[in-house]
Amino acid sequence: MAVIFLGEMIRAYRERDPAARSNVEVLLCYPGLHAVIWHKMAHALWQRGFVLPARCLSHLGRFLTGIEIHPAAKIGRRLIIDHGMGVVIGETAEVGDDVYIYHQVTLGGTSSARGKRHPTIGNNVIVGAGAKILGGFAVGENARVGANAVVVGPVAANTTVVGIPARPVVRGASRRAQFDAYGMPTDCDLDPLLHDVEIMRGELAELEARMISMTRQHAGE
């Protein structure tokens, strides 16, 4: 199983990271891969009730990689953590398959109460550098979270969100499933608030034109 797991992870890095030039390079030089290996061991201990050893192993992995993954977190297959430094994945977080996470990402909670308080990340999601996803909600499959976005509510599948707080941006249907480096799309307006303001400005201009037209008609009577 360990050999299959390593082979699958290395293959995923080789396919999705153009800087990965060999299997040996990925195995020896990629802290994201190392962090997932440490987590896999810590998670196995956690599931068997060895809480303190699991926490200690997780702490060691954090020390060696700069990536903190709570041993209770559920991690899917082929998770890629690119660069990795500063990534934090909380206790009740769940990460699906083929997820791509950049450095300085936080999958955190907004409550000190016990229970589900960290996000659930669907399959094939990309989370850009510096993004914070905070709360016990879901980020749907194929979603994109732009760099430095702060997400405080659910994200629908196939949706791209950017900004603080994060808001959806409109994209072409054929581009939604593509790989977006750092979760940042290049085929749409990256400022959804500005987009909304421009819509409002257009509506106001249309309303003003109608008022002028009505005034002229009334004056002609």
Image (cartoon, helix red, strand yellow):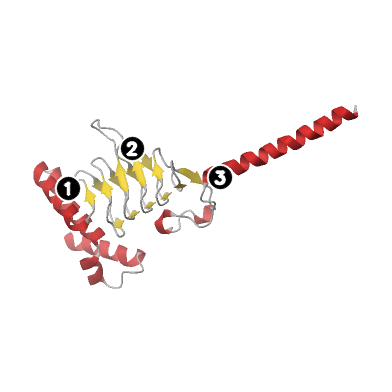
Sequence-wise first label, 1 or 2: 1
Residue ranking furthest to the bottom: 21
User: Mark 1 and 2 residues: CB-CB less than 8 Å, in contact?
Assistant: no
Identify which amino acid the numbered label 2 is placed on.
Answer: Gly
- For the N terminus, the image quarter is bottom left
Which residue, given by chain and number where applicable, does mark 2 sit on?
135
- Residue, x 40% and y 39% (percent of image)? 154
Residue 98 found in image quarter: bottom left
Which numbered dot is residue 194?
Answer: 3
Three-letter code for the amino acid on which mark 1 is drawn: His
Query: For mark 1, does the 10 Å Cα neighbourhood hold few (<14), some (14 to 19), or many (20 or more) residues?
Result: many
Label whose residue precedes the other's in the sequence (1 or 3): 1
Q: Which residue is mark 1?
A: 43
The numbered mark at residue 94 is: none
**Front position in the image: 9 or 102:** 102
The amino acid pointed to by label 3 is: Leu
Residue 50 in view, yes or no:
no
Q: CA distance from mark 1 to mark 3?
A: 44 Å
Classify 138 as above or below 25. Answer: above
- Residue 89 in sight: yes
Quarter-wise, where is residue 15 in the image? bottom left
